[in-house]
Image: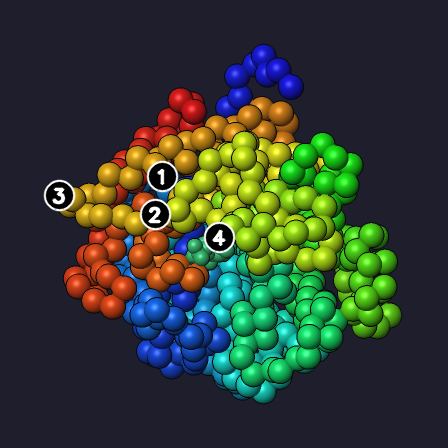
Amino acid sequence: MLRKTKAHFPSDFLWGAATSAFQVEGAWNEDGKGKSVVDDRPTPNGISDAKVASDHYHRYREDIALMKELGLKSYRFSIAWTRIYPNGEDQEVNQKGIEFYENLIDELLKNDITPIVTLYHFDIPQSLEDRYHGWCSEEMVEIFARYAKTIFEYFGKKVKHWISINEQMMMVFNTAMLLGKGKEISQNDIYKEYMQACIHMSLAEKRAFQLCHELVDGGMIGPASAFQLCYPATSSPKDVQAAMDAEEFLSYLVLDLSVRGEIPTVLTSYLKSIGAYPTITKEQETLLKADRPDFIAFNYYASVTVKEPGDIEKDADLVFFNTENYTIVNNLNCRTSEWLRGAYDPLGINIIMRRLNDRYRLPVMVTENGYPQVDTLVDGTVYDKERIEYVKEHLSAIKEAIGDGIEVLGYQMWTFIDALSGSQGFKKRYGLVYIDRDEQDLKTLNRYKKQSFYWYQNIIKENGESL
Ligand code: BG6
């Protein structure tokens, strides 16, 4: 579409940055915190674990002072369930955990930074994994609801922006993250088990939506989708159909459950045909159809390209997404980079917003977007011009979507301070602020502002007018 008028970011746009508890907090066993599945995950090739991470637990005041200096309007972080209920379903809350988040929230508000709080970001308590095999069990629904209720009761007066579950799809299709290490599942039952766990998570999410709407005056809550934008490799109708199938699986399966309370039509038939359609009782069906989210948040780094099912492209990025319905290929029209998984595709963020708007008509928010690279500290800073370029291009595509009439609530850049990467420790960094540590050597853990910090500071100051 030709755009003949200049777009502007709204004056209340939430210019922000994001982190998650296990990736920055450290203090993994302090002040009564229990062990979570991510604390206990295997860390191959000498990459760092979550024990110290970026030491945010001890340095959050210093970090918030940096956020203030940067001019952030919002900060997305997650609450570690194991700081609140160390074993997931303890009788009493852990007061020290409540205190930590209360202080964090107060400090943010004192500095005019809006907290955006994720209830659950990959880190269920290890005890729940041991006792129930995590989300494989229906019991998790009410256990999660109780945790969410506690959080809303303690923090709902001050926090109005909530994220329910981070990247449910990634957990659904990744046994190690979702089911922990305990449960042995035969290859035959694996899809059924994935889908059942997915439904349990969606039911838990619905309970969180209900509780938020009931307990948080003026509160809004939405899921953080790991939306996978899937392009067909060619204009062959078979490739186009495969791209639709991939997007149904990777993006709309979970989002349709969040918004419409049902599994997409074509997926329903497919899952039934392979005996993997989950068991859903009448009562659960009603719960799934209960409260809708108030907005859709999504995390976006790169797009995905697929062709009709066939020979696997071994060197394609993201091959782990392959199924019998589509084959992942590289997109020859897009750049790639060493650490970006999938295609470097700024316009993709705009296309996602249009798709979400068409399908759900809800406001959207970007809860993660950022550029991974190996950063080197030189004269007290990091010259991360590739990161600046990446964010700039994505923000321009968002601005275009705003001009097109889509309601975009905010942008939370991943990450504020360098964080422990999901799979690559501290070698791979995303932050606006550099943390002085290596994979194993904790060094000083001091904070250094990267060039992207100063660039983003200016963009926020001029409300993105130069983009
Ligand atoms: C998202 C997660 O999937 O991607 C984050 O929500 C994660 O927790 C981010 O860190 C980047 O992935 P990685 O593996 O590069 O850290």
Q: Of the two numbered discs 2 and 3 on the same chain, state the one appearing first in sequence.
A: 2
Q: Secondary structure at mark 1?
A: helix
Residue 62, quarter of picture: bottom left
- The residue tagged 2 is 373
For the residue pair 102 and 326, the one nearer the viewer reads as 326
Q: Are marks 1 and 3 in contact (CB under 8 Å)?
A: no
- Mark 2 near mark 1, Cβ–Cβ under 8 Å? yes
- Would you say residue 440 is visible in this rendering? yes
Residue 116 numbered tag: 4
Q: Position of residue 366 (x, y in %)?
A: 53, 43
Q: CA distance from mark 4 to mark 3?
A: 33 Å
Q: Earlier in the sequence, mark 4 or mark 1?
A: 4
Label 3 belongs to which residue?
A: 379
Nearer the observer, 213 or 181: 181
Q: Earlier in the sequence, mark 2 or mark 1?
A: 2
Q: Quick check: marks 4 and 3 in contact, CB under 8 Å?
A: no
Q: Residue at x 68, y 69 (%)?
A: 194
Drawn side of residue 269 relative to residue 241, left or right: right
Q: How many marks?
A: 4
Secondary element type, mark 3 = loop
Residue 22 position, x and y percent, is: 41, 66
- The type of residue carrying mark 4 is Ile
